[in-house]
Image (spheres, rainbow, N blue to C red):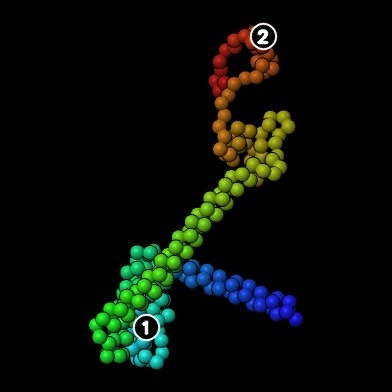
Amino acid sequence: MGRLVFTLGDNIVSRTSISGTRLIGRIQGRLDRLSTLAVVLSSCLALVLIGIGDYITGTEIIFTMFYLIPVSAISWKLGRSAGIVASLICAVVWSIVDYFGRPLFDPVTVVWNIAIQFAMFVSYAVVLSKVRTGIDAQTAVNEDLEAALAEVKRLSGVIPICAWCKKIRDSEGVWHQLETYILDHSEVDFTHSICPECKHTLYPGRGKSGPFPRTAGI
């Protein structure tokens, strides 16, 4: 019975983690498709609506978590510095709404509340910006790895080559010189010379080690 409970718990945690990852991926994709101006304007509008909703509902309903929405969007799209600025603005708006909702606060309490909210918002913004930086770095590494693997696989597999002239046929059925094909599908280069056997065949009277005349392309 205990093993069954643990198994069910692991399955629930695994599915929840997968769902959360998919949700984050969708949000990331939508934010990445938006322009910087669109994200800033949307975040400002969201902050205004959150502030109005926080004021209307009064102190009975806590709206603190909703202020993290504009902080998250700004931090994800614009980075840590912009996230810190957004955190400060959200903390000020939250404190103003809280002050007018409960006007018995003294100035010291207001400053204290702003500091506490700012610390919470900015901590979230810094962590989120680091997560975004890590994801971008990992994405760049994956792209470089895929490009390297693609380069490695360019000359793998079976290559059709003519048994007589040594030309190579590509995937489109076009025949290329051996040097041309290798140059187009790898990072190597060629320097031309002549081997002793060919030298003896082309210039039989000069011996294998004697000088031979230079010709074009050799």
Sooner in the amino-acid sequence: mark 2 or mark 1: 1
Q: Look at the image and tell me whether residue 44 can be seen.
A: no
Give coordinates of residue 164: x percent, y percent: 72, 29
| Residue 103 placement (x, y as % from top left) | 27, 90
Residue at the disc numbered 2:
207
In this view, the residue in front, 72 or 112, is 112
Kind of residue at badge 1: Ile
Q: Secondary structure at mark 1?
A: helix
Quadrant that contains the N terminus: bottom right
Instruction: Please state which of residues 96 and 39 is positioned toward the viewer in this rendering.
Output: 96
Residue ranking furthest to the right: 1
Which residue lies most toward the top here?
205
| Farthest front residue in view | 108
Q: Is residue 187 visible?
A: yes
Q: Position of residue 202 (x, y in %)?
A: 66, 15
Give the x, y percent position of residue 145.
Answer: 56, 50
Q: Nearer the viewer, residue 106 or 162?
A: 106
Q: Nearer the viewer, mark 2 or mark 1?
A: 1
The residue identified by callout 1 is 50
Q: Is residue 216 above or below residue 181?
A: above
Residue nearer the viewer, 9 or 20: 9
Q: Residue at x 41, y 76 (%)?
A: 68
What residue lies at 55% left-to-right and 23% top-to-bottom?
217
Indicate the amino acid at tag 2: Gly
In the picture provided, is 66 more to the left or to the right than 172? left
Which quadrant of the figure has residue 182? Answer: top right
Task: State the residue at coordinates (62%, 9%).
Answer: 210
